[in-house]
Image (cartoon, rainbow, N blue to C red):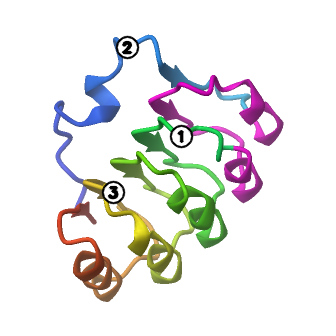
């Protein structure tokens, strides 16, 4: 079942902020260096990126929202994602992420929302993450 989209989510609420960066479809791994360092919302949905792109995102220390829906990322990308210190909202819908990848998010204590709709994440993986990060709301 698809999650009901709450317009209060950061992915929607931050759209009017000038630090909101929505990538175009042709955006690829090599373009990560063009994302301004003070970006607070990075929308990469449907972009041609892989796990390597996220290795180039560690400079985004102010990033609060990351949308990776419908990209080619896998569990390998989540190590870099977990290193983002301000990340509150993460969208992983329609990706190849599994329970193994979610385990890398256990250190994300400020994470408040995660969407794993249409992924390889199981109910057990969700429960495991919820026990490590009790305040996270997970849509599956």
* Residue marked by disc 2: 17
User: Could you say which quadrant of the image residue 37 lies in?
Assistant: top right
Q: Which of 96 and 36 is in front in this view?
A: 36
Q: Residue 61 carries which label?
A: 1
Residue 15: x percent and y percent? 35, 18
- Which stretch appears magenta? 28-56
Residue 80: x percent and y percent? 62, 59
Element under label 3? Answer: strand
Q: Does the magenta stretch include residue 107?
A: no
Element under label 1? Answer: loop
Q: Answer left or right for 34 relative to 73.
A: right
Quadrant containing the C terminus in the rendered view? bottom left
Residue 13: x percent and y percent? 25, 25
Quadrant containing the N terminus in the rendered view? bottom left
Q: Residue at x 50, y 74 (%)?
A: 104
| Disc 2 from disc 3: Cα separation | 22 Å
Q: Answer left or right for 9 relative to 129.
A: left
Q: Which residue is drawn at 60% across and 26% down?
A: 23
Q: Is residue 2 above or below residue 49?
A: below
* Residue marked by disc 3: 115
- Residues at discs 2 and 3 in contact (Cβ within 8 Å): no
**Mark found first going from the N terminus, 2 or 1:** 2
Q: Which residue is drawn at 49% across and 48% down?
A: 69
Q: In this view, does 125 lie above or below 140?
A: below
């Amino acid at each position: 079942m698809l999650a009901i989209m709450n317009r209060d989510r950061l992915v929607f609420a931050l759209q009017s902020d000038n630090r909101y960066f929505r990538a175009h479809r042709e955006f690829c791994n090599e373009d990560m260096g063009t994302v301004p360092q003070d970006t607070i919302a990075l929308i990469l949905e449907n972009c041609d990126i892989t796990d390597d792109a996220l290795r180039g995102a560690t400079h985004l220390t102010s990033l609060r929202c990351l949308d990776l829906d419908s990209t080619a990322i896998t569990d390998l990308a989540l190590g870099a994602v977990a290193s983002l210190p301000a990340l509150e909202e993460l969208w992983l819908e329609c990706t190849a992420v599994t329970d193994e990848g979610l385990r890398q998010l256990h250190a994300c204590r400020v994470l408040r929302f995660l969407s794993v709709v249409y992924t390889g994440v199981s109910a057990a993986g969700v429960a495991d993450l919820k026990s490590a990060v009790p305040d996270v709301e997970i849509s599956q």
